Amino acid sequence: MSQTEAPSGKFAATDPFALVRDWLAEATASEINDPNAIALATVSPEGLPNVRMVLLKDIEDDAFVFYTNYESAKAGEILATGKAAFVMHWKSLRRQVRVRGLVEKEDGPAADAYYASRSLASRLGAWASKQSRPLKSRGALMAEVAKVTALKGPNPPRPPHWGGFRIRPVEIEFWADGAHRLHDRFRWTRADPSATEWEVARLNP
Ligand SMILES: Cc1cc2nc3c(=O)[nH]c(=O)nc-3n(C[C@H](O)[C@H](O)[C@H](O)COP(=O)(O)O)c2cc1C
Ligand SMILES: Cc1ncc(COP(=O)(O)O)c(C=O)c1O
């Protein structure tokens, strides 16, 4: 049981995923681009953190999904540790959402459907790019694109090295800017990603 007051106003919710969806919908109306951009943090097996932007493509009832190359640096770190965190920051709203959790691959029908929804050029690009590995030249990449275009045709299947990751959170924090740096923060936590009960606490700014 939390020792702090319950969330109200823009923080009011019974389900944190619904609240992220609501805040993202507001940001979609006010951000200049990519309201679904997240800074995704991973950690190497030696404990060295790493962070980069990706696009959040789905907010499910109990998880967050993004898509990438399974042979990339981020994928290597996720597959080694099973963990990730991300932050979304909306300058127009002066709000952020922070998420920490366990990660699993989404390489089934949802990944196939998402891949199929992308432009043909992006689908072929996913075949051509050996993401995160050294590239001799821009020309070598374009030659690879031409090669896979000829090879895969107009309806390429999803590459086995490309798909989704599903982040199943144990912690979601909602933050909104306050006057004089006296911000509002509410942190939702649960014991593990299969738990349905969340504890909510107001935090000091
Ligand atoms: C706004 C933005 C969105 C991006 N979205 C993705 C994405 O959804 N998936 C992806 O693989 N890379 C995305 N990238 C590129 C990544 O930031 C990164 O360069 C790439 O995934 C390689 O990261 P890694 O070497 O740490 O694996 C995005 C970059 C930016 C700036
Ligand atoms: C390399 C890469 N893969 C995937 C994505 C995800 O976006 P989309 O599926 O809309 O191309 C991005 C977005 O910037 C990207 O840069």
Image (cartoon, rainbow, N blue to C red):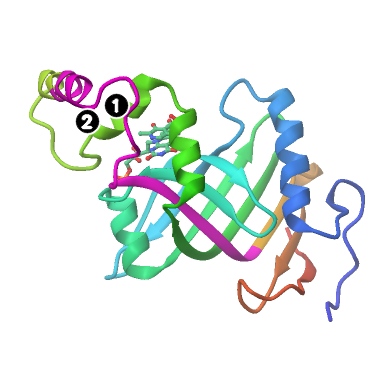
Residue at (53% x, 42% y) in the render = 38
131 drawn magenta: no
Residue 89: image quadrant is top right
Q: Is residue 183 visible in this depiction of the protein? A: no
Q: Are the residues tagged 1 and 2 within 8 Å (C-beta)?
A: yes
Tell me the quarter of the image containing the N terminus: bottom right
The x and y percentages for residue 45 are: 29, 70
Which element type, helix, strand or loop, lies under badge 2? helix
Locate residue 177, reporting x and y percent.
75, 43
Q: Amino acid at mark 2?
A: Ala
Asked if the beta carbon under badge 2 is closer than 8 A to the nearest atom of ligand 2, the reply is no
Q: In the figure, 68 relative to 28: above or below?
A: below
The residue range painted magenta reads 144-171
Q: Viewed as shown, does residue 52 lie left or right of 32?
A: left
**Residue at position x 45%, y 52% from top?**
108
Q: Quadrant of ligand 1?
A: top left
- Which x, y percent locates residue 72? 27, 48
Residue indicated by mark 1? 124
Kindly identify the amino acid type of the residue bearing the numbered disc 1: Leu
Q: Say which of 12 and 141 sits in front.
A: 141
Tell me residue 172's x, y (percent).
66, 60
User: Is 93 positioned to the left or the right of 152 in the image?
Assistant: right
In this view of the protein, can residue 27 be seen by the observer? yes
Q: Quadrant of residue 88?
A: top right
Q: Residue at x 91, y 54 (%)?
A: 8
Q: Which residue is mark 2?
A: 128
